[in-house]
Image (cartoon, rainbow, N blue to C red):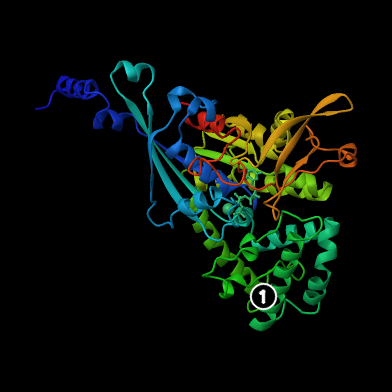
Amino acid sequence: MIRRDDILSTTWKALEAGGSRLGHALLDRRLRLGITGLRGAGKTVFCTSLIELITGGRDWDERFPLLSRERRPIAGRILPVPGWKPFPIEEMRARLQAATPDWPPPTAEPTATRIEFDIPADGLWRRLGLSGRRIDIELVDYPGEWLLDLALLKADFASWSRETLRLIDLSPTRTALSREWRAEVAAHDLSAHLPDDTLFSLHRGYVEFLRRCRFSDPPLYLLAPGQFIRPPADIRAETDFHFFPASPAGERKAARGSAFAELEARYQRYRRRVREFYERSFQGIDAQVVLVDVLEALNQGPESFADLQRALRLCMESFDYGPSNPILRWFRPSIARIAFAATKADQVTRNQWNNHRLLLEKLLSEQVRRARAGRVEIEFFSVASVRGTREVKRMFRDRPISMLQGRKKGAPEDIIEIYPGEVPADLPGPDYWQRPHRFVDFLPWRDGAARSEAAAPAEQIGLDELLDFLLRR
Ligand SMILES: Nc1nc2c(ncn2[C@@H]2O[C@H](COP(=O)(O)OP(=O)(O)OP(=O)(O)O)[C@@H](O)[C@H]2O)c(=O)[nH]1
Ligand SMILES: [Mg+2]
């Protein structure tokens, strides 16, 4: 018979052996990160830099000063995630560290990766003789447009259609761009049967409308279904995909065989696919990283900015942390921590980083309040996963001002110098929109023509601080 004392002494011996397998087993920590960000928010660049930091970090004091000593990753390695295409880290690394570095293209398909590493044992664990704790981070990268499909999971076809059509009426740009498509829909009786070809043509009209909103001036963010804009290669041709928002004829339930009933059935099948994707990507996440590019929306003006806010709120509602949300029950997430990161901090000068962070906090104040009430730990960061600029001081009317130097997209040979302007610390009012500001999309930084330290990961802002927060006990 095994006595309790035997077990204890065996455990104790294993611990005394220092960093033994059993020691690791006791201290292992799996961290499933839910990377959340709309298109172009900076997810892929963030994932690349995070993996680089964990697997190749060095010169910690100079390069990652805000990552505490006891949380510096040791012996990081990249592992596959069964059932997922691997995150293309080699390709990303090659792009960002090339002699003429460039950003990755928009993500076309979801990928996942696992990063396993140790961090030094601290406090009690070190006294017990353990050399380290093992951490295992899993993350999924996906096309940002798809994030907006989360909201579909909460709505049936009739209410999704109602909301979508209401939004079209509310927003001047949407109203203008949808005119042609709405006229086409109005020419058909959806309470009657319609052939597939007609439904397909009306669906294409809706997709075209979404695309025009995406590239309009100003561009809009809240465009759903997101997979219509960035379709997964395997389902583009399937009829499940060929629907569009439609108002039911009167209050009656859609008659069997009617076009409306067919659209409803397709919507529901589409939703099942979406749900599968989200279950695979977000179910069981412990921590969330919410990446937001507020600067691009500030460049685009009040209508874009308001639309970004609307889109973000809608997504965040799907991750509601209050107890009564049905989505919460389905995800059953035990999200303990959220890092909200305002991305591309290198597009503004250092004295604006605090505002950059505060603006994101204001943008999502209601969602943040609810998450805090649900005892989720929250912090805000101003982050540049890969820096594209350097800051220099210049004298202007006898006063020193900060300027940014960098290379613009499309002109990699010339270093330009600009004054980007200010970031508001609160939601921008009319006075902000009058003031000049321009946050330029710079290329990743490179020193001179020949990069002397070609293998070194590019510089970052705030990534060290963010990782420190995620790894905190
Ligand atoms: N200056 C600067 N620009 C960045 C940074 N991260 C991303 N960008 C810019 O933002 C663009 C989009 O970044 P991605 O990481 O591809 O964005 P994403 O969220 O993966 O976008 P999707 O794949 O379309 O969903 C890049 O092409 C860069 O122009 C950064 O740290 N600094
Ligand atoms: Mg991407």
- In the displayed structure, would residue 154 be above or below residue 228? above
Could you say which is closer to the camera, residue 157 or residue 421?
421
Considering the image in quadrants, where does the N terminus appear? top left
Residue at 35%, 29% (x, y): give it: 133
Q: Position of residue 11 (x, y in %)?
A: 21, 24
| Residue position marked by numbered label 1 in the rendering | 255
Out of 345 and 278, give the one closest to the viewer: 345
Q: Is residue 155 above or below residue 469?
A: below
Count of marks placed on residues: 1
Residue 76: quarter of image: top left
Please give the name of the residue rendered at 24% of the width and 29% of the height, measured from the top-left corner: 20
Quick one: SS at disc 1?
A: loop
Q: Report if residue 16 is visible in the image.
A: yes
Q: Is the CB atom of the residue marked by disc 1 within 8 angstroms of ligand 1's nearest atom? A: no
In the image: residue 383, left or right of residue 302 = left
Q: Position of residue 198 (x, y in %)?
A: 69, 81
Q: Examine the rendering and report whether any part of residue 64 can be seen.
A: no
Q: In this view, does 119 lie to the left or right of 340?
A: left
* Image position, residue 382 (x, y; %): 65, 34
Q: Which amino acid does label 1 sit on?
A: Ala
Q: Position of residue 261 (x, y in %)?
A: 64, 73
Residue at image position (63%, 32%) is 381
Q: For the point 53% across and 27% down, which residue is it?
A: 62
- Which class describes the residues within 10 Å of circle 1: few (<14), some (14-19), or many (20+)? some
